[in-house]
Amino acid sequence: MALVDLFNIKKQYDIKLLLDDVDFHLNEGERVTIVGQNGCGKSTLMKIIMGTEEPTEGKRVVTNSIQIEMLSQQPKFDPELNVRDAILNELSELKTAKDEYDLLSLQVAEDCENQELLKKLEKVSAFLDHHNAWNLDDKIERILQEFKLKEYEYRPVISLSGGEQRRVALASLILKKPDILLLDEPTNHLDVYMVEFLEEILLKEKFTLLFISHDRHFIDTIATRVVEVDNQELVSYTGGYMAYLEQKEARMHAMKKSHDNLLRLLKQEESWLGKGVKAREKRNQGRKKRVFELREEAKHNPTLIRKMMVELEREKKHFNRDEGVSRKKMLFDLENMSYAVPGKKLIENLTTRILQKDKIAIVGINGAGKSTLLKLMLGRLKPDSGIIEQGDFELGYFDQHREMLDNNKTLIETFCPDGGDHIDVQGIDFHVYGYLKSFLFPKEFLDKKVAMLSGGEKNRVALALLLAKKVDCLILDEPTNDLDIQTINILEEKLINFPGAILFVSHDRYFIDKIASKLFIFKGNGIVEESYQTYSEYLNIEKELKELNYLEQEVKSSVKKEEKPKEKIQTKLSYKEQKDFDILPDEIEALENEIGALNKCLGDPDCYQEKGLNTISEELALLEKVYEEKTDRYLEVLEIYEELS
């Protein structure tokens, strides 16, 4: 059933035409994303659907009495309210309905034949069902935790940062569950864990949703349809981001001559998806299946859960760090580096190296110190202890404030400060228009002042300027912010082909997977982990570890309930158990190193030809069997030890 219909909509500002004779329909239960280049009219279309913007021509039809709510870019709050009260204030209608339901239930219990009371109760019950508002207190508590607002719940909401206030507004809208929810860049100011929670709740609560986003992972997870604003028209594609790419490529083939460059980018994107994401999905599904199988087996053998947790922890780690790297290739060498702010450790005893061709993503929870690490590398902050050694090389830096831009200069003055119309791009001579065209700037922008550009356009200029310079290392702080998907694709192509090192902070899972070959993961409280997995794989394993931990607690709880009292209670490990507990960890670690060395040999033709492929395979099979037996025994003893502790 269509909840909102737009017919023959035209929208024009002065001489700029954004939408020309377009139709749009939003059905109940759909989750539609609007995509397109910055400035094409995405937000305008959303405001027309909301009813806060009038079309120049055309008609908007909305189903009677439906509630449409929109997440504001700059939400307004009563200055007297704290965070919790600001959320409760938005839920007053639901609270009133729940109180009415409780009262009517008591009245019906006393007079169960009263048809008028029964009808009222049924109506209120349906309203609470629709908004899933039966256990609001529990939901408020969870959303405060997941959106990292719990520590601020009694602080005045207006004392929070702009990003934190947006999280409060988003939390209120999710709990309110309007008939149609409109979200403009909902993942801005959310770390990856908050985004995962947002995805979970939007899917679980079956929202009817219209949203604008450049987060392709979020689009692919959430969207049932993609609507692209293209050349003043709307083009609709069914499915999420991957389906959109496939359908758009087919459409581009039909318009090939005028869209060769875009078609090439689309093919690159699809090729990467085919090789990377689908293969990872298959691996993750296999691992997921094992988790579900464990649920039944674990009832009879809880040790299986811990075994899989150990396997997953091993999978999270990577032991092939090359200690024999030539120092000529070293850009940064960090040794036992620590840094803290009052009351909070950000980095503690970090030892690592950044080499000539490393592509490193700095990821993790908000406020953990990711941007601080960049400032330490740039020399803008000094570590509290430890050292940072820096090699002799050229460095390029991009920050969210675009500090390299002068608002008073035109684009041609920015790129050709000494006059002329040519620019040196990493040693190659380009006409400035030809270079800027690859960043989607039309010729008429050359004489535009930087001050007149939108936030996304300024980001494009800053990135184009940075990527033209001949540097050995790029340091980028949230480079995809304010960029549309098409520009992100261009940025990805440039970074993939960049010959030097890249160190970047981002929450964009899709972008990270595509660019990074290594992760620095900020866990909080000064802990920084290194991983050579893709970010998606790391997050999947982390999520599965949480599920297994929950399952382990569940199984232990049920086993304790079923246990009969024992005649003799064990109070300490036996002699053999204690011996195994002490020596098995070292033996298991030694086996892991041997297995790792053999696996490495199997990937090196010189090594396996010298030793013999069959010999290595047999030795590996034997070691893996011993490893499994020793791991099983250690887990068995560990479980006894934990029960006695």
Image (cartoon, rainbow, N blue to C red):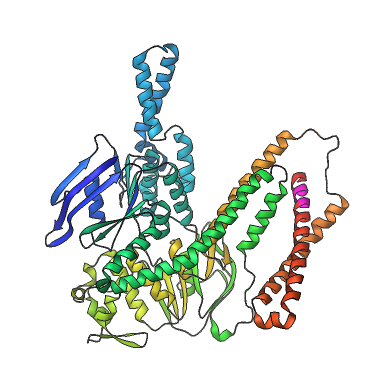
Q: Residue 176: x, y in percent?
A: 37, 38
Q: Residue 364: x, y in percent?
A: 50, 60
Please tell me which residue is depicted at 49% across the width and 85% down the height of the picture: 392
* Quadrant placement of the N terminus: top left
**Location of residue 2 with respect to 358 vertically, above or below:** above
**Location of residue 18 with respect to 389 vertically, above or below:** above
Tell me: 284 left or right of 630: left
Tell me: 361 left or right of 440: right
Q: Quadrant of residue 44?
A: bottom left
Dominant SS in magenta: helix
Query: Is residue 637 a member of the stretch shown in magenta?
Result: yes
For the image, the number of numbered tags is: 0
Please tell me which residue is depicted at 83% across the width and 54% down the height of the picture: 578
Is residue 563 in view from this perspective?
yes
Query: Is residue 577 a member of the stretch shown in magenta?
Result: no
Please tell me which residue is depicted at 27% across the width and 67% down the height of the picture: 254
Tell me: 53 left or right of 439: left
Which region shows up in magenta? 636-641
Q: Residue 502: x, y in percent?
A: 46, 74
Q: Nearer the viewer, residue 552 or 473?
A: 552
**Location of residue 432 with respect to 529 vertically, above or below:** below
Please tell me which residue is depicted at 61% across the width and 50% down the height of the picture: 291
Is residue 344 in view from this perspective?
no
**Location of residue 550 with respect to 526 vertically, above or below:** above
Q: Nearer the viewer, residue 23 or 91?
A: 23
Q: Nearer the viewer, residue 56 or 173?
A: 56
Q: Residue 378: x, y in percent?
A: 46, 74
Q: Quadrant of residue 64?
A: top left
